[in-house]
C-alpha cells in the first residue's frame, strides 16, 4: 500500500515539475546579436531585446543586429 502511495506521489511530483518548467520559458533569448570585431559575425547572440543588446554594446565599438537565423528564416507562404 505504501509503495503504491509513494509511487503515485513521485509520479505526481514529476508531472508537476515538467509542466511548470515547460511553461516557464520566457522570451526568446537569441533574437539580437552583439556584433563587432571581437565577436565576428553573427556575433554574441544571447539578447532578447534590442535595448538589452545596445546597453551591453555601450562604450565599445560594437553594434547590435537581428540574429540572421531569424532575419533570413524561411517565410511561410499562404496560398489561396
Image (cartoon, rainbow, N blue to C red):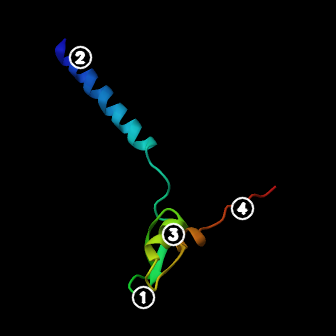
Residue 45 higher or lower than 6, as above or below: below
Using the rendered view, name the quadrant where residue 17 is placed: top left
Number of other residues with Cα within 10 Å of mark 3, as a class: few under 14, some 14 to 19, many 20 or more: many
- The residue mark sitting in front, 3 or 4, is 3
Which mark identifies residue 5? 2
* Mark 2 vs 3, N-terminal side: 2
Quadrant of the rendering where the N terminus is positioned: top left
Judge left or right: residue 64 versus residue 6: right
Cα distance in 3D space between marks 4 and 2: 52 Å
- Asked whether disc 3 touches disc 1, contact meaning CB atoms under 8 Å apart, the reply is no
Secondary structure beneath dot 1 equals loop
Which mark identifies residue 37? 1
Number of other residues with Cα within 10 Å of mark 4, as a class: few under 14, some 14 to 19, many 20 or more: few
Query: Whole-percent x and y of residue 13?
Result: 30, 29
Using the rendered view, name the quadrant where residue 11 is placed: top left
Number of other residues with Cα within 10 Å of mark 1, as a class: few under 14, some 14 to 19, many 20 or more: few
Q: Nearer the viewer, residue 78 or 26?
A: 26
Secondary structure beneath dot 2 equals helix
- Asked whether disc 4 touches disc 2, contact meaning CB atoms under 8 Å apart, the reply is no
Residue designated by label 3? 32
Cα distance in 3D space between marks 4 and 1: 36 Å
- Asked whether disc 3 touches disc 4, contact meaning CB atoms under 8 Å apart, the reply is no
Q: Nearer the viewer, residue 51 or 79?
A: 51
Cα distance in 3D space between marks 3 and 4: 25 Å
Cα distance in 3D space between marks 3 and 1: 16 Å
Cα distance in 3D space between marks 2 and 3: 48 Å
Residue designated by label 4? 77
- The residue mark sitting in front, 1 or 2, is 1
Cα distance in 3D space between marks 1 and 2: 60 Å
Judge left or right: residue 70 versus residue 58: right
Amino acid at each position: 500500500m505504501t509503495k503504491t502511495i509513494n509511487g503515485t506521489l513521485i509520479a505526481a511530483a514529476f508531472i508537476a515539475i515538467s509542466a511548470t518548467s515547460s511553461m516557464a520559458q520566457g522570451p526568446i533569448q537569441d533574437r539580437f546579436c552583439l556584433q563587432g570585431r571581437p565577436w565576428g559575425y553573427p556575433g554574441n547572440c544571447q539578447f532578447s531585446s534590442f535595448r538589452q543588446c545596445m546597453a551591453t554594446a555601450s562604450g565599445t565599438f560594437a553594434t547590435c543586429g537581428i540574429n540572421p537565423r531569424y532575419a533570413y528564416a524561411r517565410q511561410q507562404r499562404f496560398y489561396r
